[in-house]
């Protein structure tokens, strides 16, 4: 993540230096709209618009992955709770089994069976 941030900052610095070295006046025309300004300003605006468009294009994918991640975290939490309840149930059933085996051994007149596990 830090490498991406550092490379983004370095790219921005290079873009600003490029724009500052190219500061001649230009006119940009788009359909009926016309804008006059320095080449540096036009380049920085174009760079900014490109970044905004890239962000808008990638945002649906990011939102889907965040939603999927949160859904999976909820599912993991639910499964962990179920696992804990099942482990408690297994412990209860083991205790009942031991008491039944002990009662069976007493009824048969034998010593209680020790747990062999």
Image (spheres, grey):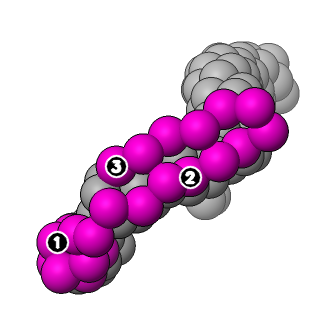
User: Magenta span has 8?
Assistant: no
Say left or right for 78 vs 35.
right
Say left or right for 9 vs 31.
left
Q: Nearer the viewer, residue 70 or 49?
A: 49
Q: Does residue 60 lie above or below 100 as drawn?
A: below
Mark 2 or mark 3, earlier in chain: 2
* Secondary structure type for disc 3: strand
On residue 28, which mark appears?
A: 2
Mark 2 or mark 1, earlier in chain: 1
Q: Position of residue 106 (x, y in %)?
A: 70, 22
> Are there few (<14), some (14-19), or many (20+) residues within 10 Å of tag 3?
few
Q: Quadrant of the N terminus?
A: bottom left
Q: Position of residue 75 (x, y in %)?
A: 72, 28
Q: Nearer the viewer, residue 32 or 79?
A: 32
Residue at 27% over, 70% down: 24
Kindly check if marks 2 and 3 are in contact, taking CB atoms under 8 A apart as contact: yes
Q: Nearer the viewer, residue 31 or 64?
A: 31
* Secondary structure type for disc 1: helix
Mark 3 or mark 1, earlier in chain: 1
Q: Quadrant of the C terminus?
A: bottom right
- Label 2, label 1: how far apart the Cα atoms are: 18 Å
Mark 3 — residue? Answer: 37
On residue 20, which mark appears?
A: 1
Q: Nearer the viewer, residue 68 or 101?
A: 68
Residue at 23% over, 69% down: 23
**Which stretch is magenta?**
15-37
Quadrant of the image occupied by residue 41:
bottom left
Quadrant of the image occupied by residue 107:
top right
On residue 93, which mark appears?
A: none
Q: Does residue 97 lie above or below 50 as drawn?
A: above
Q: Position of residue 95 (x, y in %)?
A: 63, 23
């Amino acid at each position: 993540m830090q490498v991406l941030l550092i490379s983004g900052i370095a790219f921005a610095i290079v873009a600003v230096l490029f724009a500052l070295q190219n500061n001649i006046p230009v006119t940009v025309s788009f359909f009926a709209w016309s804008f006059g300004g320095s080449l540096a300003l036009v380049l920085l605006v174009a760079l900014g618009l490109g970044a905004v468009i890239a962000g808008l294009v990638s945002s649906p994918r990011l939102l889907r992955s965040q939603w999927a991640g949160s859904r999976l975290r909820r599912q993991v939490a639910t499964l962990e709770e179920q696992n804990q309840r099942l482990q408690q149930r297994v412990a209860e059933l083991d205790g009942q089994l031991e008491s039944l085996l002990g009662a069976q051994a007493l009824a048969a007149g034998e010593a209680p069976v020790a747990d062999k596990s």
